[in-house]
Amino acid sequence: MKRLQKTNITNKVPIRTCIGCRSTDAKHGLIRLVNSPEGILVDQTGKRDGRGAYIHTNHQCLNRILDGHTLSKALRVEIGPDDLLGLKKNIEIMTVKMSLEVAQ
Ligand SMILES: [Zn+2]
């Protein structure tokens, strides 16, 4: 019966694929980037409309997508160097926020 319980728990946690390392993880361990009318944004609520992509908040995964190619492929949008710079800033703010929440 232990096995059954474990399965039930797993089913309740939404699983998403990180576009940086391509591994899957619980949704709450990833941040969502969304291609919105205002540009590429960090989706803090996870509920914004638009094509989204998920990414781990560690530097390894972030560095992989900040070359632009991986992200533009995932979101199916052209991403310029300025967009990337702005996005990088937003992600950094978000990751600091998240680590503060974990610490509390
Ligand atoms: Zn990752």
Image: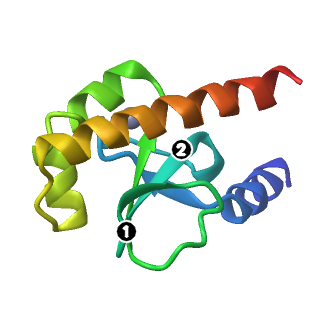
Name of the residue lying farthest toward the right: 104
Lower position in the chain sequence, tag 1 or tag 2: 2
User: Which image quadrant is residue 82 in?
Assistant: top left
92 on left or right of 61: right
* Residue 30: mark in rendering: 2
Q: Residue at x 14, y 34 (%)?
A: 67
* Residue 19: mark in rendering: none
Q: Position of residue 89 (x, y in %)?
A: 41, 33
99 on left or right of 72: right
Say if disc 1 is inside 8 Å of ligand 1: no
Say if disc 2 is inside 8 Å of ligand 1: yes
The residue nearer to you, when weighing 14 against 82, is 82
Q: Position of residue 98 (x, y in %)?
A: 68, 33
User: Which residue position holds label 1?
Assistant: 38
Q: Report the Cα–Cα distance between label 1 and label 2.
A: 22 Å
Amino acid type shown at disc 2: Leu
Q: Residue at x 23, y 34 (%)?
A: 66
Whether 63 is drawn above or below 53: the answer is above
Q: Position of residue 81 (x, y in %)?
A: 13, 40
